[in-house]
Image: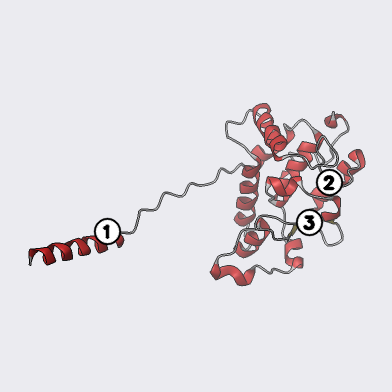
Amino acid sequence: MWVIESFTGRIRRKEAVENIIPAREPIKQPLVLSAEEVARFLEAVPALRDRVTLVTAYAAGLRVGEVSRLKPSAIDSKRMLILITASKGGKDRYVMLSPRLLSILRSYWCLTKPRHWLFPGRNPDDPVSVATLQEACRKARQHAALDKQVTAHVLRHSFATRLYGRGTDIQLTQVLLGHAPLPSTERYTQVATNLIARARSPLGDLDARLRSRPSAASSR
């Protein structure tokens, strides 16, 4: 009899253990820069190509791998959109092209005349590497005397926080960032491109802080 009772007790203890919900680890808040810090950081990037690449990443909320693989043909100045191809998950998406960024990219193009890649690497047949951009971030952080561990992804966090903070719809923000949709928001992933184009990039907030036209001297 005691064998049955002992076995039953073990079963109940096992069921009790299986029903225990594990404690969730605390969610860390992403590092976000103020508009002044973003401007200080971007101004401290010495090379023209690297600076414009990172400005583009911030202006459109792009992943560093996405911005490095942009092609000139991805810039749609008529509809004020940028086409991101084969992003995370192998999907394409559109992001907004702010007038300020378009002006910067046109000045950059006039100075550098990129062909296959908008931001070519040392070998023009290859895009600038992610490692090169992350190293540019490290140097810029030092030159700007920022005590925050700024990376290219921190620019993306700052973009998203500022965009949502000014009242941009959360579903539109999700689409612009290229996040995988949750089941409850899947129906919002096909946002019309006219809505995307109307979203205002936080790059415009830096007008008083960031030079809009890259100079030839800064490319050296």
Dot 1: element: helix
Residue 8 x/y as whole percent: 17, 66
Badge 2, how many Cα within 10 Å: few under 14, some, many 20+? some
Q: Residue at x 68, y 27 (%)?
A: 143
Gap between marks 3 and 2 measured at Cα: 14 Å
Q: Foreground mark, 2 or 1? A: 1
Residue 120 x/y as whole percent: 82, 41
Amino acid type at circle 1 is Val
Dot 2: element: loop
Q: Is residue 187 left or right of residue 126?
A: left
Residue 49 x/y as whole percent: 80, 37
Whether residue 29 appears in this view of the structure is: yes
Label 2 belongs to which residue? 117
Label 1 belongs to which residue? 17
Gap between marks 3 and 1 measured at Cα: 51 Å
> 154 above or below 179?
above
**Nearest to N terminus: mark 3 or mark 2:** 3
Q: Foreground mark, 3 or 2? A: 2
